[in-house]
Image: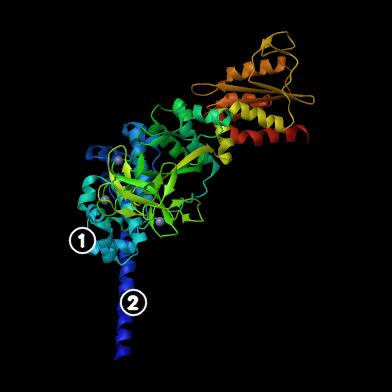
């Protein structure tokens, strides 16, 4: 009989496990697949706009580029970033599946679960207190990102999705795509300026400074000066630049946020275990060895010395005739004495009082440029500089003696403007960037040939932006002018190095 029972139980377990598996799959992406209107602040109007650019779910929202979305959706940039950040934070929360299952089975809503006494939750879910507290903390966090109605109406089922806490591992993307992505951000002049300052070393690291009168609680004054006076807007942009890999972040501090108002001004309070009063006084204990009397220090105080209130003897030497066993808290309201009063956090902004386990724990980061992306950013911000660097690597130098006020004197005696002129041994290299609205035409090539001849250039490279006409190309080829085309200088750069190698190979073969 016993044996049979066991076998039966095992079967039931197996079925249960299978059911669990299925349930987990079904609900795995629940949070990610939530409609964007679940996010606090996104109403149906905004949701309709987002839908036009293909953003329906929280996951979609996470995957858009804020700048592209801003241009299309016509919402203020900081709004889009705020929504994205909420989505991101929601997806990072990983909830304990067991707790969720038990609470969902009991029909709890998110709001009810937060309000419930942790002891009751512990009993229902058969978990230890630490897990329950962790769960409540995360639940409190998510209520801040979730729209109020979603919070009220949904059972905790909504949180079933298990989410990886690890940093999302980004798949290797080809450098071309990477450049395009970074270029999009650099189209924003404020971001370009900030990155330029970082590239040049004026700003080595963006370190946070406390700003406790603001909701965010900290800011990056050096970045705010350039990007936006609002520390939240600036921070969101920095966070996005980190997400796309332009910036690196480094742990700086951990802060607690009030779950009601988000401010970080939380202050510790001691509370009487018996009557709940905050009116406690702290005093040291003294134990008189002679009569074994233990009391607060102030009851021993007499003039400059200590006298035992019980036996009236003088206390002379610590360790010899008395000891100090510890600190006690005395309630001024009910007189209760305790060594460990309740500890509660008081939000100095909204007055909310909470247990120490309740506030959200947030990381505060400092930011630096991602060394691995530096070359791309430099190329995009200052392509000419990059071209010169490549040439220097190839042994060219830029100390041209015929330079007159930044112009170059030809053999005819005429001064010429030029984009890049460099020398290597007997070779003289002239590079011209020629931009045309449509195509670079043949007359521009004429002018270049004339200039090259007067400057006695032996290597001539034409960088045609955005492209060159067929006949102009033919003409350039005939005159041994190397041509590279591209929408802008930065686009030409990836091919430039190979071209220079090609030219040098031909020259010195
Ligand atoms: Zn005594
Ligand atoms: Zn009391
Ligand atoms: Zn508060």
Up-down relation of residue 210 to residue 145 (above or below): above
Q: Is residue 189 left or right of residue 360?
A: right
Name which residue lies at 34% across and 59% down: 28
Residue 461 pos. (x, y %): 65, 26
In the rendering, which numbered label is found on residue 14? Answer: 2
Q: Residues within 10 Å of mark 1 (few under 14, many from 20)?
A: some
Do residues under tags 1 and 2 come within 8 Å of each other at their CB atoms?
no
- The quadrant holding residue 2 is bottom left
Task: Please tell me which of labels 1 and 2 falls first in the chain.
Answer: 2
Quarter where residue 20 is shown: bottom left
Mark sitting on residue 107: 1
SS for tag 1?
loop
Task: Point out the image quarter for the C terminus.
Answer: top right
Q: Position of residue 300 (x, y in %)?
A: 39, 49
Task: Tell me if residue 122 comes above or below residue 297 in the rendering.
Answer: below
Which of these two is toward me, 65 or 161?
Answer: 161
Residue at 45%, 45% in the rendered image: 305
**Colour pattern of the rendering:** rainbow
From the viewer's side, name the closer residue of 501 and 276. 276
Mark 2 nearby-residue class (10 Å; few <14, some 14–19, many ≥20):
few
- Nearest the viewer among 472 and 190 is 190
At which x and y percent is residue 78? 36, 33
Nearest the eye: 208 or 335: 335
Residue 9: assigned label: none
Q: Is residue 125 left or right of residue 194?
A: left
Residue drawn at the location 33% of the way across and 59% of the way down? 132
As helix, strand or loop, the secondary structure at mark 2 comes to helix
Residue 80 shows in the view: yes
Q: At which x and y percent is residue 167?
A: 46, 50
- Locate the N terminus by quadrant: bottom left
């Amino acid at each position: 009989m016993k044996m049979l029972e066991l076998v039966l139980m095992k079967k039931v377990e197996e079925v249960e496990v299978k059911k669990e598996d299925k349930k987990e799959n079904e609900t795995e992406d629940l949070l990610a697949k939530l409609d964007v209107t679940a996010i606090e602040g996104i109403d149906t109007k905004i949701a309709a706009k987002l839908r036009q650019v293909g953003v329906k779910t929280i996951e979609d929202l996470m995957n858009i580029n804020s700048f592209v979305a801003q241009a299309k959706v016509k919402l203020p940039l900081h709004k889009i970033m705020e929504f994205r950040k909420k989505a991101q934070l929601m997806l990072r929360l990983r909830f304990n599946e067991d707790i969720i299952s038990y609470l969902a089975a009991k029909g709890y809503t998110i709001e009810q679960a937060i309000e419930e006494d942790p002891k009751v939750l512990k009993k229902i879910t058969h978990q230890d207190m630490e897990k329950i507290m962790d769960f409540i903390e995360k639940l409190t966090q998510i209520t801040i990102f979730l729209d109020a109605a979603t919070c009220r109406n949904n059972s905790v089922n909504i949180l079933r999705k298990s989410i990886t806490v690890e940093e999302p591992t980004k798949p290797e993307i080809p450098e071309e795509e990477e450049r395009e992505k970074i270029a999009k951000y650099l189209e924003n002049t404020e971001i370009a300026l900030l990155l330029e300052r970082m590239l040049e070393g004026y700003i080595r690291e963006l370190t946070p400074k406390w700003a406790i009168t603001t909701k965010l609680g900290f800011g990056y004054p050096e970045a705010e000066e350039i990007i936006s006076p609002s520390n939240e807007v600036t921070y969101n942009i920095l966070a996005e630049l980190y997400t796309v890999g332009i910036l690196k972040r480094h742990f700086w501090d951990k802060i607690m946020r009030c779950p009601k108002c988000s401010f970080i001004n939380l202050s510790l309070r001691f509370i009487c275990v018996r009557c709940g009063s905050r009116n406690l006084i702290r005093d040291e204990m003294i134990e008189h060895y002679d009569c074994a009397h233990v009391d607060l220090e102030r009851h021993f105080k007499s003039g400059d010395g200590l006298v035992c209130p019980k036996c009236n003897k003088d206390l002379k030497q610590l360790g010899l005739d008395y000891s100090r066993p510890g600190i006690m808290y005395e309630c001024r309201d009910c007189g209760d004495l305790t060594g460990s009063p309740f500890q509660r956090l008081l939000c100095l902004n909204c007055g909310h009082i909470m247990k120490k386990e309740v506030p959200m724990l947030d990381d505060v980061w400092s930011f630096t440029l991602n060394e691995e992306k530096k070359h791309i950013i430099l190329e995009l911000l200052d392509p000419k500089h990059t071209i010169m660097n490549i040439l220097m690597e190839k042994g060219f130098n830029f100390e041209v003696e015929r330079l007159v006020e930044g112009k170059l004197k030809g053999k005819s005696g005429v001064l010429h403007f030029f984009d890049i002129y460099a020398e290597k041994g007997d070779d003289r290299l002239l590079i011209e960037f020629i931009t045309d609205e449509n195509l670079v035409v043949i007359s521009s090539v004429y002018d270049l040939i004339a200039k090259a001849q007067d400057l006695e250039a032996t290597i001539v490279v034409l960088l045609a932006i955005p492209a060159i006409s067929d006949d102009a190309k033919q003409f350039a080829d005939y005159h041994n002018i190397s041509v590279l085309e591209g929408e802008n200088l930065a686009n030409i750069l990836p091919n430039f190095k190979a071209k220079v190698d090609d030219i040098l190979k031909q020259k010195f073969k």
